[in-house]
Amino acid sequence: MTVHVLFVCLGNICRSPMAEAVFRHLVEEAGLGEQIVVDSAGTSDYHIGERAHSGTRTVLRANGIEYDGRARQITPADFERFDYILAMDNDNLADLRRMAPPQTRAVIARFLDFADGVSSREVPDPYYYGQAEFEYVYRLVRRGAEALLAHIRAERGL
Ligand code: 4NP
């Protein structure tokens, strides 16, 4: 059975594409590319069709991770298709809970809720800041992605 994982932020150009790329990288490293499908989306329509922010692309490239995705907005169908829908911050989580159809079976949580050793439960928005903030966000995302993958592997027996 395939597990579907969706990362969600506001614009789908900074944080959730970074999480998608890092998580997919770890999934492929673990040889689980056939079992775990990864995607990302934004709660807003602000940046539909755009490439990831240059800060995200730069930090991914520096860490040897490819990313070619374009921004999209979350749709009602995503709540049917995805098993885990992971918010970057509390606002994203509140928006997702509001948008979710009552019958959804998806786990809707904050991405960092699975990262025990990380003090923050939110991935801060780097949009208004410089490259150093994108690098800080990358380190958080990396730890979050490792913890999430361990959680999903344990929960799904992968
Ligand atoms: P993201 O960052 O939610 O991590 O993609 C943002 C991107 C765009 C905006 C805000 C945050 N914006 O207001 O346009």
Image (cartoon, rainbow, N blue to C red):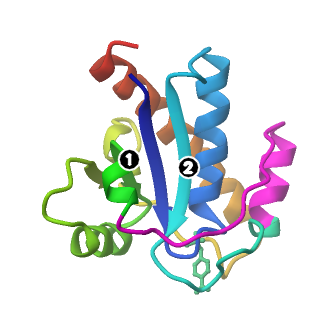
- Ligand 1 quadrant in view: bottom right
Compared to 117, does 21 lie above or below?
below
Q: Position of residue 102 (x, y in %)?
A: 13, 64
Residue 62 lies within the magenta run: yes
Q: Residues within 10 Å of mark 2 (few under 14, many from 20)?
A: some
Mark found first going from the N terminus, 1 or 2: 2
Dot 1 corresponds to which residue? Answer: 82
Q: Quadrant of the N terminus?
A: top left
Q: Which residue is found at the position 32% from the left and 69% from the top? A: 90
Q: Secondary structure at mark 1?
A: loop
Which disc number belongs to residue 132?
Answer: none
Dot 2 corresponds to which residue? Answer: 39
The answer to which of 32 and 22 lies nearer the viewer is: 32
Q: Quadrant of the C terminus?
A: top left
* Prevailing secondary structure class for the magenta stretch in the rendered image: loop
**In the image, 57: left or right of 10?**
right
Compared to 51, does 120 lie above or below?
above
Q: Amino acid at mark 2?
A: Asp
Residue stretch in magenta: 55-76
Compared to 152, does 62 lie above or below?
below
Q: Position of residue 54 (x, y in %)?
A: 82, 67
Q: Residues within 10 Å of mark 1 (few under 14, many from 20)?
A: many
CB at disc 1 and ligand 1 closer than 8 Å: no
Q: Amino acid at mark 1?
A: Phe
The answer to which of 117 and 67 lies nearer the viewer is: 67
- Tell me, yes or no, whether the two marked residues, 1 and 2, touch with CB atoms within 8 Å: yes
